[in-house]
Image (cartoon, rainbow, N blue to C red):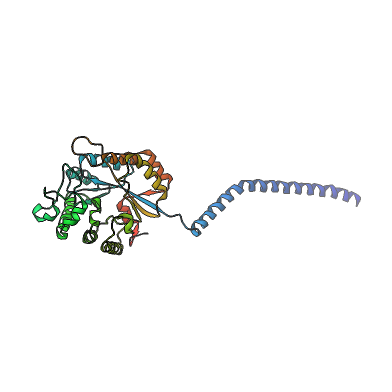
């Protein structure tokens, strides 16, 4: 029995040692496996947590921006600068002045670029001193729109004082129809120097043109943001009616419009736009800018130095990078309409 025990004991010890070694190896293997799996498991957990948080927490507000250049078609220098801003810069939209001297030149460009965004800058006044313009309609049909020299009135106030509503409507429809006939794929309507906000009946005409042609118009939710000079109760009522009519037809309406930069000195332009971008409201905002080259010859735009400053800012790499860093998405009018239901973002 002692011999048996002696045999058994050493055997048992050997078995125990072997089993212990096997368990140690298993533990080591498991430890190694856990060390390998932990980073992967943490990654999966983080992703799963992020998905849960994404679905539970409120999403950051979406901020879209239409960067829009007015006054294409005014003069050749405006055309050239606007095209540069569209082709090389961050400008996503422009609008064309149909009655102006360089309309045909820009219309040829626009017709050849149907993928780009072109609106009609409805025009009932002429604010320049040379190479002035008048109506597209026959002058004898719209005499109330003409000054003593046979051109549009120079100021919007003079237009509002003299224009008959039926003649204004005839002229504005003629401008839209001429743009269509030139092969321009019209994305929206706006108006030169906000002339159609000078009278309630002109404002209602503006909204009616939008609905009749099924074309969006430049319109913002709150009157004071875009038309600070409108203190006429009838204009305020007409404007609010316009918001509801546009929304009922699914037309896009801006959350905000920055039209205040035109009067800034050239040296302040860059600082103004760079400061405005981080502070954009949720929804869709429009920057209204004006592009032109400095005066070369007699056909140059008013305040060409300010316009050239706009061009420099919005063709700069600095502006492109800053837009991205601010998390702002630049869109055109067609996208604006696509992402809008009932005048509100989808």
Check the image and report above or below for 202 versus 300. Answer: below
89 over 195 or under it: above or below: above
Q: Quadrant of residue 196?
A: bottom left
Report the quarter where the C terminus lies: bottom left
Q: Quadrant of residue 252?
A: bottom left
**Residue 142 in view here:** no
The x and y percentages for residue 89 are 32, 41
Residue 146 seen anywhere in this rendered image of the structure: yes
* Total numbered labels: 0
Is residue 222 left or right of 61 when viewed as pictured? left
Q: Residue at x 76, y 47 (%)?
A: 18
Q: Nearer the viewer, residue 234 or 345?
A: 234
- Position in image of residue 144 (x %, y %): 13, 55
Image coordinates of residue 247 in percent, x first then y, are 31, 62
Give the camera-side residue of 342 and 161.
Answer: 161
Residue occupying the point 75% across, 49% down? 19
> Which is nearer the eye, 45 or 190?
190
Q: Is residue 259 above or below residue 79?
A: below
Q: Nearer the viewer, residue 222 or 233?
A: 233
């Amino acid at each position: 029995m002692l011999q048996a025990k002696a045999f058994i004991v050493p055997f048992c010890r050997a078995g125990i040692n072997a089993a212990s070694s096997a368990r140690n190896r298993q533990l080591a293997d498991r430890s190694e496996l856990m060390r390998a799996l932990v980073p992967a498991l943490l990654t999966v957990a983080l992703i799963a947590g992020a998905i849960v948080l994404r679905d539970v927490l409120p999403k950051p507000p979406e901020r879209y921006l239409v960067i829009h250049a007015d006054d294409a078609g005014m003069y050749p220098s405006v055309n050239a600068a606007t095209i540069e801003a569209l082709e090389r810069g961050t400008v996503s939209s422009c609008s064309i002045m149909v009655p102006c001297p360089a309309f045909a030149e820009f219309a040829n460009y626009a017709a050849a670029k149907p993928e780009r965004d072109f609106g009609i800058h409805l025009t009932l006044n002429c604010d320049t001193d040379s190479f002035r313009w008048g109506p597209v309609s026959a002058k004898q049909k719209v005499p109330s729109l003409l000054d003593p020299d046979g051109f549009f009135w120079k100021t919007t106030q003079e237009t509002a004082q003299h224009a008959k509503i039926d003649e204004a409507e005839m002229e504005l429809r003629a401008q839209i129809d001429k743009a269509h006939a030139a092969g321009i794929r019209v994305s929206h309507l706006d108006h030169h120097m906000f002339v159609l906000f000078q009278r309630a009946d002109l404002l209602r005409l503006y909204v009616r043109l939008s609905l009749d042609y099924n074309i969006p118009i430049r319109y913002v939710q709150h009157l004071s943001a875009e038309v600070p000079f409108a203190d006429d109760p009838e204009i305020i009522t007409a404007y609010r009616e316009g918001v509801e009519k546009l929304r009922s037809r699914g037309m896009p309406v801006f959350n905000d419009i920055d039209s205040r930069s035109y009067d800034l000195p050239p040296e302040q332009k860059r600082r103004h736009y760079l400061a405005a971008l981080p502070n954009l409201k949720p929804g869709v905002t429009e920057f209204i800018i004006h592009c032109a080259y400095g005066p070369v010859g007699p056909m140059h735009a008013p305040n060409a130095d300010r316009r050239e400053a706009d061009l420099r800012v919005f063709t700069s790499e600095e502006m492109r990078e800053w837009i991205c860093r601010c998390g702002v998405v630049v869109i055109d009018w067609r996208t604006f309409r696509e992402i809008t239901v009932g005048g509100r973002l989808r």
